[in-house]
Image (tube, helix red, strand yellow):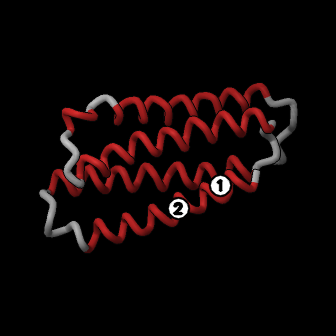
Amino acid sequence: MNKYLAVSSFLGAITIVLGAFGAHALKSALTQDQLLSFETAVRYQMYHVIVLLFVNIYNGFTEHQQKWINGFFITGILLFSGSIYAITFGVPAKAIWFITPLGGILLILGWIYMGQSFLSSKKKINK
């Protein structure tokens, strides 16, 4: 699953760039609430990038399971964090209000599917 590792790495790099941009360039341009929202988007993106790296090096998932988990998390990151970034940069929240919770639902579904995949796994996890 090298393509998913590459996508995860790219998303990780973007996370660092956005985090630095938010901490330095946006600090004086945004309200405190806007900055907190932006930081939430960056934080959730990084959490899920780290999980994606795990998912794609863990050999206990089938290829099918990896594809679904990657799909849930990557799409969830793009919708959840991406919509918050878009709002921060001027897209009216009223125009895309439904995208953030949809992304959040996909992130939740990714976690649920990953948990279900662990439970249904025939492989033993080394302790």
User: x%, y% of residue 116?
Assistant: 68, 26
Determine crowd level at label 2: few under 14, some 14-19, many 20+ residues with C-alpha closer than 10 A. Answer: many
Return the residue nearer the eye: 24 or 118: 24
How many marks can you see?
Answer: 2
Q: Residue at x 86, y 38 (%)?
A: 124
| Residue 9 in the image, given as x and y percentages of width and height | 60, 62
The residue where tag 2 is placed is: 12
Residue 80 x, y percent position in the rendering: 39, 41
Front residue of 91 and 113: 91
Does residue 37 appear left or right of residue 69 in this picture? Answer: left
Give the mark nearer the N terminus: 1 vs 2: 2
Q: Horizontally, is 28 left or right of 119 in the view?
A: left
Q: Would you say the residues marked 1 and 2 are in contact, meaning their CB atoms lie under 8 Å apart?
A: yes
**Residue 4 in the image: above or below residue 20:** above
User: Which numbered disc covers residue 53?
Assistant: 1
Task: Name the residue: 30% across, 46% down.
Answer: 84
Bin the neighbour count of mark 1 within 10 Å (Cα to Cα): few under 14, some 14-19, many 20 and up: some
Residue at 15 percent across and 60 percent down: it is: 30
Amino acid type indicated by mark 1: Leu
Q: Is residue 36 left or right of residue 1?
A: left
* Amino acid type of the residue tagged 2 in the rendering: Gly
- Left/right placement of residue 102 relative to residue 11 reads left
Q: On the image, which quarter does residue 27 sit in?
A: bottom left
Residue at horizontal 57%, vertical 35%? 72
Give SS at disc 2: helix
Residue furthest right in the image: 123
Q: SS of the residue at dot 1? A: helix
Residue 93 in the image: x percent, y percent?
A: 21, 38
Distance, label 1 to label 2, CA atoms, is 10 Å
